Image: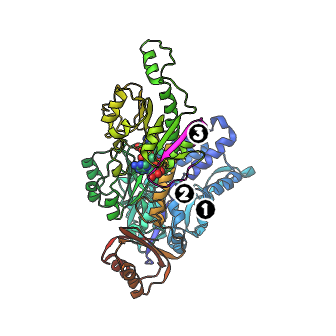
Amino acid sequence: METEHNFIIDFDSTFIKVESLDYMAEKAFAREDESEAAHLSQQFRAITDQGMSAEITFEESINKRLNFLKGDRKLVAETVEELKGLVTESFRANRKFLEDHADKIFIVSNGFIDLIAPVVAEYGIPESNIYANRFIYGPEDRIIGMNKENPLSKNQGKVKVTKALSLEGFVYVIGDGYTDYEIKEAGLATKFYAFTGNVSREKVTAVADHIAPSLDEVLFDLGIEGAVSYPKSRIKILLLENVHKSAEERLRDEGFDVETYAAAMDEDMLIERIKGVSIVGLRSKTQLTRRVIEAADRLVAVGAFCIGTNQIDLPACTEKGIAVFNAPYSNTRSVVELALGQIIMLMRNVFDASMSMHSGKWSKTAEGCFEIRGKKLGIIGYGNIGAQLSILAEAAGMDVYYYDLEEKLPLGNVTKCETLEELLRLSDVVSLHVDGRPDNKNVFGEKQFSIMKDGVVFLNLSRGHVVDVNALKKYIDNGKILGAAVDVFPTEPRSNKDPFESILIGCRNTILTSHIGGSTLEAQQNIAAFVPSKLINYINAGETLNSVNFPEIKLSKIDGAHRLMHIHRNVPGILANINQVFAKHKCNILGQSLKTNESIGYLITAIDKQYDAEVVEDLKNIPDTISFRVLY
Ligand SMILES: NC(=O)c1ccc[n+]([C@@H]2O[C@H](COP(=O)([O-])OP(=O)(O)OC[C@H]3O[C@@H](n4cnc5c(N)ncnc54)[C@H](O)[C@@H]3O)[C@@H](O)[C@H]2O)c1
Ligand SMILES: O=C(O)CC[C@@H](O)C(=O)O
């Protein structure tokens, strides 16, 4: 970095996540009177905000607050220890930058050096570079005031201090408050960065030269190498279909720019809205078609917040180097519990009985009602859900059979059927748990229903297109099927506001549910933890473990290395071409991992930080390269 870059950095809500004086006041109020603490803290914070947004003068704000506060040296020391853990993520991550340039970094704050110095010292910033107020202590070490002659206790204090610093070269101011902007307004700074990582004030962002949600953004804007190669605040994530709030929070906390939309979007809308989006999160209703994928100009990853990925054109994603992740286990238990409950309800004809009670008709009968104990359950698709259902059903006394295209380990006492027909001929209950691959379209139709036992109970909680619903209706209507539960449909509404249409509406002893097999809070929370972690690992480290369409790679972190991720078509000789580039530029390779699938290869190479910038260009230009990125 050029020597003439100077940084004036605010402390409260910029270097640290909170307002230190407010934070200390809260602790003081809680000490005095727990019941009044929240109320007093709120009043205290309101005064801070008035000062920060220039509603009252800064002097007024600080005087008012000090009169309010009851503190002592012990409280200050305790607060400092806690503030050390509240340093803003991007400052924490850029410790090296702060340490390396500590002599050109000035903390100019209207806060108190007593709270600031020990915190920033951990990042190499000396006390001589801190300009702030100081508490005055009285008897028993109580805070009785502040040094009023310090310019930082008065209006325009930051301006006066900066002027006195007489800095040479460029001066960059980073802060969340209007008082930070005043330095630029006074003509003393080259650029004012409104820091919005912790709090965003309209009055301040409106006058900023640049809005910076993180220190990474400032460094990126200035072309200075920081902790990350690309600021996460520039990575846009679009979360559709009401995914659980905690996913949004997790991704926001990580620093991404997250936008949410409660329903699925139709193709044209998605084509419009996916522009500029790097990651899209969806559930089962959003059709990520080839057209959408082709229109996506920045998409690098897709998060399916569910199990099924049949709604995503996986080959199109792979061809474009877009990694897809899902949550293969998180909602399986919820589906299984619903299926088991439905089997019992259908065997007892509960839904028709309940409908008749709702219409004022008492109908007590044992006709057509059975226990599940000793009945034969036939599971088609013995995957994660099918296998779990077999365990619970067996525990409830059912005799379980399964049929799967693949060789599967039978759990408990279940019996494998060699053919679908064999299973259909013997089962009293048939439950479908196959995946949504295109080949499974209408695999369950006229022929399969016709060979089932009379009085069979039928469930589909897998995918709508797997069953021919016209045939299903025919066999419910003619009485062959005793009862059915259908959770998934060939066409489903995009949101709760759109109408539901199906020929199954009104069918006897038929439970229709709105694709809610996995819709429990537990499942949604689990998914919201699982999928973001995969997306974050992919963005931060290039890891693809559990990806649906990418070769799986995890390369341990190597200090002092840059990670180069190369996605290419799987053609002969490409690894040799890549390594020739490294050899030509004399790169020191510290680690390398390549995995391929039938269509693409994914190579992560860790190289020593010192390398020729042309390496990047040469790697991008290798024929059959799909995409390339560098991670610090
Ligand atoms: N209703 C819901 O809300 C909900 C929730 C979660 C999952 N699902 C769906 O449930 C289904 C099962 O999920 P899973 O996690 O158990 O999937 P899985 O991939 O673990 O298991 C599917 C199994 O079906 C087998 N299979 C595929 N086609 C078959 C066929 N034609 N005949 C026989 N076996 C076949 C596969 O070999 C595999 O073992 C999926 O379609 C999934 O999308 C629905
Ligand atoms: O929640 C959803 O939209 C889909 C649930 C389910 O079908 C899945 O694939 O996990």
**Of marks 3 and 1, the one in the foreground:** 3
Q: In which image quadrant can residue 300 be found?
A: bottom left
What residue lies at 72% left-to-right and 52% top-to-bottom?
Answer: 141
Considering depth in this image, is 193 or 406 the residue closer to the camera?
A: 406
Please state the horizontal and vertical placement of residue 230, each as a whole percent of the image: 41, 66
Q: Find the magenta span and give its range.
A: 391-410
Q: How far apart are marks 2 and 3 (CA)?
A: 56 Å
Q: Which of marks 2 and 3 is nearer the N terminus?
A: 2
Q: Earlier in the sequence, mark 1 or mark 2?
A: 2
Considering depth in this image, is 12 or 501 the residue closer to the camera?
A: 501
The residue indicated by pointer 3 is 394
Q: In this view, does 161 lie above or below 74?
A: below
Please state the horizontal and vertical placement of residue 463, each as a whole percent of the image: 38, 43
Considering depth in this image, is 86 or 208 the residue closer to the camera?
A: 86
Label 2 residue SS = loop
Q: What residue type is disc 1 on?
A: Val
Tell how many labels: 3
Judged left or right of residue 501, residue 363 is: right
Q: How far apart are marks 3 and 1 (CA)?
A: 60 Å
